[in-house]
Image: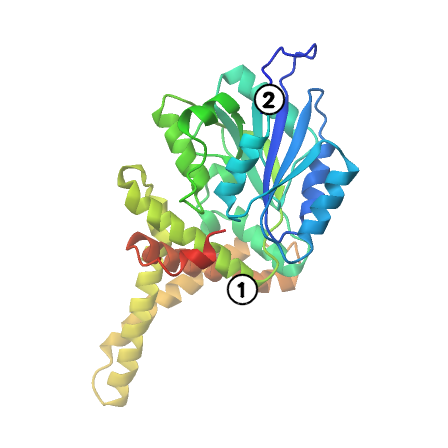
Amino acid sequence: MAQQKPGDDANPLPGVSYVMPVLNDVTHVRAAVDSLLGQRYDGPFEVTIALGPSIDGTTELVAELSATDERVHVIDNEVGSTPAGLNIAIRASRYPIVVRVDAHSVLPPDYTALAVETILRTGADNVGGVMAAEGTTAFEKAVARAYGSRVGLGGTPIHVGGAEGPAETVYLGVFRRESLLRVGLFDEEIKRGQDWELNRRLRRNGGTVWFTPALTVVYRPRASLPRLARQFLSTGLWRGELANRFPASNSVRYFAPPAMVLVVVLGTLLGLAGVVQAASGVAPWLLIGFAAPAFYALIVIVAMLAVGVRDGLRSSLWFLIVLPCIHFSWGIGFVLGFFKLTKNITAHTGR
C-alpha cells in the first residue's frame, strides 16, 4: 500500500495510522476504538484492527465498527498473536506515524496531538508515556492499585511516571513508520515483551525512544483472578526468555520477583521441616524458615496500607490477594522462561 509522507497533503500535520491487534476482547474494543475516533487531531488518520480468531462476539463487533465508520478497517490475523497482528496492521496501513493501541486501552482526546508534537520536537523514533490502570469493580481497582504501586510492578516510569527524556522502553508507542521498517517491525517469535525487544533494536540502531509523562493512557485491568494469573505467568515467561536471550540488557528489577518466589518457597519448606522437627522431639530450629513468608506477608500488608482504602474495604482486601498473584505468577513464569522450560506453556499463554 502506498505510504503518505508529511507534506503530501495541504494539511501540514502528518497522517496517523492506529494499529490494534484484537482477540476475544468484546468487552473493551468499542471503548478503545471510540477513543481513537474522538481524538482532537487535525491531521488525517485511519484505524486498522488486526482481528484474531475470536469466539466471544468480537468479530461481529469490529465488523459493526468498520461498517459505521469508513476510517476503521478490519483485517484477519490468522496467527492470533499480538506481534503478528501488529505487523499485519502496520503493513496494511499507510500513514507516516504509527500509533500502537491495545484493546484494553483508552486514549485521552489529546494523546495523538501530544505524541506527534513530541516526536517532531525531539526527533525520536518512538514516544510513549504512562499506563494508568483504572478499574470499575473492587477487584479491578485492586489490580489498578497494584499496577501503580512501587511494590507491584517495580515502580518504573511506565507505571508511576517520571521525568521526560530518553528511555529503555515505553508503554504502547507512537512510531515513525520509517524507523519501524528500518529495524524489521516486531519479532513475531516473541509473544510478550515484543515492545521492549523492538525498542532495544531501535536504540541499538542509533534511534531514540522517548518517555513523556504527558502521554497518559487509561488501561483496563483483567477482570478476574485466573485471567490476571494467566496474564502475568505469560509476561513472566517471556521476560525470562528475553533475560536469557539478551543478558547484557537486563535490569536488576527483573530478578526481584523470581528471587522472592524462591526465597518464600524455600523458607516455607524449611519451616515445615521445623514443624516435623518439633513433632519428633528435635530442637525445631528450622522453624526460622517461616520468617521468609512472614516477611513477605508484612511487605504486602504495608503496601496495602500505603495505597490506602480510598476504593473501599473490598478493594483493599482484594489487594492482599492480587499483589501476591502478580508477584508469584510473574516470578514463576520468569524462572520457567529463563531456564527454557516453556515449550508446552508458551503455546497457551502467548497473548
The single residue placed furthest to the bottom in the displayed view is: 280
Question: Earlier along the polypeptide chain: callout 2 or callout 1?
Answer: 2
Residue displayed at 62% across by 32% down: 18
Q: How many marks?
A: 2
Residue 346: horizontal and vertical position, in percent? 41, 56
Relative to 323, is 74 on the left or the right?
Answer: right
Tell me if mark 1 has few (under 14), some (14-19) or many (20+) residues whose alpha carbon lies within 10 angstroms of its own.
Answer: few
In the picture of the structure, the residue carrying the numbered disc 1 is 226
Asked whether disc 2 touches disc 1, contact meaning CB atoms under 8 Å apart, the reply is: no
Display colour scheme: rainbow
**Which residue is the extreme one toward the left?**
282
- In this orientation, does residue 168 appear? no
Residue at position x 32%, y 57% in the image:
335
Secondary element at image label 1: helix
The image quadrant where one finds the N terminus is: top right
**Horizontal placement of 46 versus 345: left or right?**
right
Question: Real-space Cα distance between discs 2 and 1?
Answer: 38 Å
Mark 2: give few (<14), some (14-19) or many (20+) Cα within 10 Å.
Answer: many
Callout 1 amino acid: Pro
Front residue of 60/221: it is: 60
Using the image, determine if residue 20 lies above or below residue 97.
below
Amino acid at circle 2: Val
* SS class, disc 2: helix
Q: Residue at x 64, y 63 (%)?
A: 313
Residue 308 against residue 46 in the figure, above or below: below
Name the residue tied to disc 2: 116
Q: Quadrant of residue 318?
A: bottom right
The foreground one among 271 and 106 is 106
Q: Residue at x 27, y 73 (%)?
A: 270
Q: Looking at the image, is 87 positioned above or below residue 23?
A: above
